[in-house]
Amino acid sequence: MDIVNLLLAGGIIFLGSFFATISGFGFALVATPLLSLIMPVKWAIVFMLTLTVVLRSLTMLRVWGQFDWRTVLITSLGSFIGTVPGSMLLRRISVSSLELFLGVLLLVVTFLMSRQYTVKIANKTYGRLGAGILSGFFGACTSVGGPPLALYFLNEHTEKDLMRANMIWIFGLTGFLTLIVNYFVGNIGTVGDWTYLYTMLPGTLIGIWAGERLVFRLNQELFRRLSLLIVFFGAFMMLVSGWQGL
């Protein structure tokens, strides 16, 4: 194993963990496209699914009492529904095609929201369920499940601490299931070199530590802008990764 690639992997995971701790999402969105530049994309997806469980396990208790149970349960249910077809699709279709599709979609939605465009949701229960389904589907087949939920909650104008806590718990609950489903459909076995975890695990922990020292300094508007910036960056990198994989 090339030591340079090991160090790069650790640094990439640090960035993803840092932004995910601040915003409640963005771990895979930031890290997966960058990791795919130094390893097979399916390896990157499996590593992110594994490390997501570590990240969320450490952050869920820290926001205990700050999240809304009804929102978490409804959205998690939707994510569970989307996880199975997403995991099955990962074995049957080019990840590059999915990255290109999702990257273009996210850029369009992010642009509209940056222009203060919002969609009025008549029934928030169905809206959150639908956002959860999209999150679970894309999370299982690309490891990037955060943007559908982040954009949906931003559209609802959810207060930043509540949005962050909700997303940490949603991805904590669904992360375990997604990893288990991918194990049983055989995706975990696609990884040929697990030594990357030597730098990825410390990178995850350091990112959590650094993120928790910054998150409370953000006001609502800065939080919104940072969330949109994370989605934009991730979407752009997905397009780059998808294009290179064709």
Image (cartoon, grey):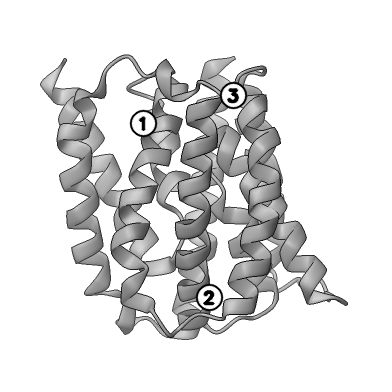
CA gap between label 2 and label 3 equals 29 Å
Q: Nearer the viewer, residue 137 or 224?
A: 137
Query: Vertical placement of 41 versus 123: above or below?
Result: above
Residue 104: x and y in percent read 68, 40
* Residue 138 visible in this rendered orientation of the protein: yes
Q: Secondary structure at mark 3?
A: helix
- Chain-order first, disc 2 or disc 3: 3
Mark 1–mark 2 CB contact (< 8 Å)? no
Residue at 67% in and 26% down:
89
Judging by the rendered image, the residue that carries numbered circle 2 is: 163
SS class, disc 1: helix
Occupied quadrant, residue 75: bottom right
Q: CA distance from mark 1 to mark 2?
A: 27 Å
Identify the residue at image location x=53%, y=17%: 245
Tell me, yes or no, whether the two marked residues, 3 and 1, touch with CB atoms within 8 Å. no
Residue 166 point in image, percent of width and height: 52, 72
Q: Give me the disc on residue 35.
A: 1
* Circle 3 residue: 95
Image height of 14 relative to 63, above or below: above
